[in-house]
Amino acid sequence: MSDKHAGGQAVIEGVMMMYSGKVNTSVRKDNKIISKKKKLKKKNKIQKAFFIRGLTNIVDMLKIGMESLIWSADQQTEEHETISKTEVTISITLSILFAILLFIVAPLYLTKLVYKDHGIIFNLIDGLIRIGVFILYILAISLMNDIKRVFQYHGAEHKTVNCFEAGKELTVKNVKKFSKVHSRCGTSFLIIVLIISILIFSLITSQKWYYKLVLRLILLPIIISLSYELLRISDKLKNNIIFNTLNKPGLWIQKITTKEPDNEQIEVAIHSLKKVI
């Protein structure tokens, strides 16, 4: 999640990698590996400032990630078929609305059914339900064959980055030895967001549900920025018991969101990372 670190994401039949101001997406098509590479715009001092950088980096990652995902999807369709900008806009809008409904509105409503007081206990139950909904969602989509393939490429991405950051040569044999989990993974970031949201949302004790909903949406950027900084610190201070404990739930969930890749998937991940280093 920084120019000084390698990272990326799984896409459809491939892997997107970022390093040192460059991004590359490689996918396997017709038994060949094809790539799309570009340089990223340099951030100004304000965008790289402490606390603000979390939001700017997350926005950039979402934009780059979506572009890479769309490009990878286009490579798996017929030559004359492409995804239009209108389809992309509709898809993103619906995805955002679905996320708000599933992870913010639904837990709030379910908590109201089981607990009437609107104090700290209410927010704690709401937070636990939100985490539970997230885990159930991940477990549900992991049963889909297409998602299993993506999760394998996710594992290939992590193994390749871990191999690179350990200073080892990027070969399939070397990469296979490394872990399929990584402390800077977006999954870990989301879990930290969910944990921090429990603490911050507990400060909202209004009896009116719509006040709670609006305030939660307003506080979301602050939670994202704080979670980003905590993720960076926990990655640097892996031996610190506090930050190690904070990062543990995200590493556990990565056991679901990453699967062991095969040799061909690792080859794609290596190819993508080599393009940017």
Image: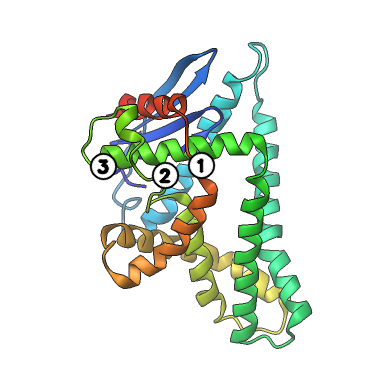
Q: Which residue is mark 2?
A: 180
Can residue 41 be seen here?
Answer: no
Mark earlier in primary sequence (2, 1)? 2
Q: Is residue 237 left or right of residue 156?
A: left
Q: Which mark is residue 36?
A: none
| Residue for badge 3 | 165
> Which x, y percent locates residue 263?
43, 26
Q: Residues within 10 Å of mark 1 (few under 14, many from 20)?
A: many
Q: How packed is label 2: few (under 14 Cα within 10 Å), some, or many (20 or more)?
A: many
What is the C-alpha distance between the residues marked 2 and 1? 7 Å
Instruction: Report the amino acid beneath label 3.
Output: Glu
Q: How is the image coloured?
A: rainbow
Q: Position of residue 119 (x, y in %)?
A: 63, 87
Kind of residue at badge 1: Lys
Gap between marks 1 and 3 measured at Cα: 20 Å
| Quadrant in which the C terminus is drawn | top left
In the rendered structure, are the residues bearing label 1 and label 3 in contact, judged by CB atoms less than 8 Å apart? no
Q: Tell me the element at label 3.
A: helix
Q: At 76% across and 80% down in the image, what residue appears? A: 114
The relative height of residue 119 versus residue 181 in the rendered view (above or below) is below
Marking on residue 259? 1
| Amino acid type at mark 2 | Lys
Q: Nearer the viewer, mark 1 or mark 3?
A: 1
Say which of 208 and 165 sits in front: 165
Which residue lies most toward the right here?
A: 113
Q: Secondary structure at mark 1?
A: loop
Marks 3 and 2: CB-CB under 8 Å?
A: no
What is the number of callouts on the image?
3
Residue at x 61%, y 59% (from the top left corner): 135
- Examine the rendered structure and indicate whether residue 116 appears above or below residue 126: below
Quadrant for residue 231, please give it.
Answer: bottom left
Evaluate if marks 2 and 1 touch, with contact meaning CB atoms under 8 Å apart.
Answer: yes
